[in-house]
Amino acid sequence: MESDASPTARALMTLELVQASPGITADRLAEKLGVSERAARRYVGILREAGIPMESVRGPYGGYRVGRGLRLPPLTFTATEALCLVMAVLDGHHDANDTTSPVGSALGKIVRALPQPVAAQAEAVRRAIAPVPDRGAARPDPQTTTELVQACSECRRVRLGYRTEAGSERDFEVDPWAVVVRHGRWYLLCWSHSSNGRRAYRIDRVRGVEVLAERFEAPAGLDPVAVLEEHLASGWEYSAEVVIEAAADAVATCVPRTLGRIEPVDAATCRLIGTTSNPWWYAEQLAAVPVPFRIVGGAELRHTAGMLGRRLLDAAEAAAEDPRSQGSGA
């Protein structure tokens, strides 16, 4: 017995099945659709009438497949495939060559819909790519991400099951403001009622999402990226205070917001105030600042910056004394 789905919906399901399994037979197609073979052929006819080049081959090895044409046939994606495509674009580190992954599956549908010359080039690139692992990336579960994005858009409070960095399991009740991707990591920027403060939780550590009945209003004029970076720069173990010999507006363009807050001192000087859990990383970031600066606060940071400076001086002096390095510069 056929289901109550409309002919159009069944035709789109037929297209999905043929795209996923080129050469699928009419009886197999009918079985997948839960209809008779006659009905399955009717759905193929609907697709042909819509201008989609549905080819059929007779014989024991025959079946249906989507032919190559200049018209791009409709594509249908699952919710997971659609979100994973967006995630792949945003973080740039999903393996599009893995045909068993949602990203690879969705990309395969796009490639199969392209005209032959374009598809051949796309497939050549797809086969040749070699993704470089990003050690800092932490990809969240697509379903969890979908639920949080939906809660953000609907302004619905949620209860999170969360695993902390120390490995303990906790529950947080939060107002989810935005999902933000920074440096290969996905964060939920929110107001935590459990902690009574603004928080940013890593979505890869979320173990469960329960959408609650309560609604909320996000802060007016919220800049999620700026707020997240300011949040990531505060509350860490080691303090930092740096006086920079340049105007605050000029420094803001070359100092990452993750280092802290920039405050003007006068027209030609500003102060950077922040915290860090990794003084070595912080000192390396400061070394890239293109204007003079002084570390006036944070004993651990001053010590680490001194070690980094001595290490670089030792490397330069060793190279100058080594005759093999003479004439090797650019």
Image (cartoon, rainbow, N blue to C red):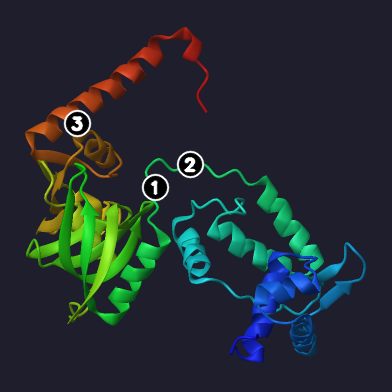
Is 102 drawn above or below residue 223 in the view shown?
above
Which residue in the structure is indicated by mark 3? 305
- Could you say where residue 55 lies in the image, as x and y percent from the top left? 85, 75
Mark 3: secondary structure = helix
Mark before the other along the chain sequence, 1 or 3: 1
Res. 223 in view: no
Is 241 drawn above or below residue 153 in the view shown?
above
Q: Residue at x 62, y 54 (%)?
A: 99
Mark 1: secondary structure = loop
**Label 3 neighbour load within 10 Å: few <14, some 14-19, many 20+:** many
Q: As shown in the figure, which amino acid type bears the numbered disc 1?
A: Ala
Mark before the other along the chain sequence, 2 or 3: 2
Q: As shown in the figure, which amino acid type bears the numbered disc 3?
A: Ala
- Could you say where residue 246 lies in the image, as x and y percent from the top left? 20, 52
In front of the other: 319 or 235: 235
Q: Residue at x 35, y 63 (%)?
A: 144
**Label 1 neighbour load within 10 Å: few <14, some 14-19, many 20+:** some
Q: As shown in the figure, which amino acid type bears the numbered disc 2?
A: Pro
- Could you say where residue 244 lies in the image, as x and y percent from the top left? 17, 47
Q: Residue at x 21, y 24 (%)?
A: 307
In front of the other: 168 or 319: 168
Which residue in the structure is indicated by mark 1? 137
For the residues bearing labels 2 and 1, Cβ distance under 8 angstroms:
yes
C-alpha gap between disc 2 and disc 1: 8 Å
* Residue 289 in which image quadrant: top left
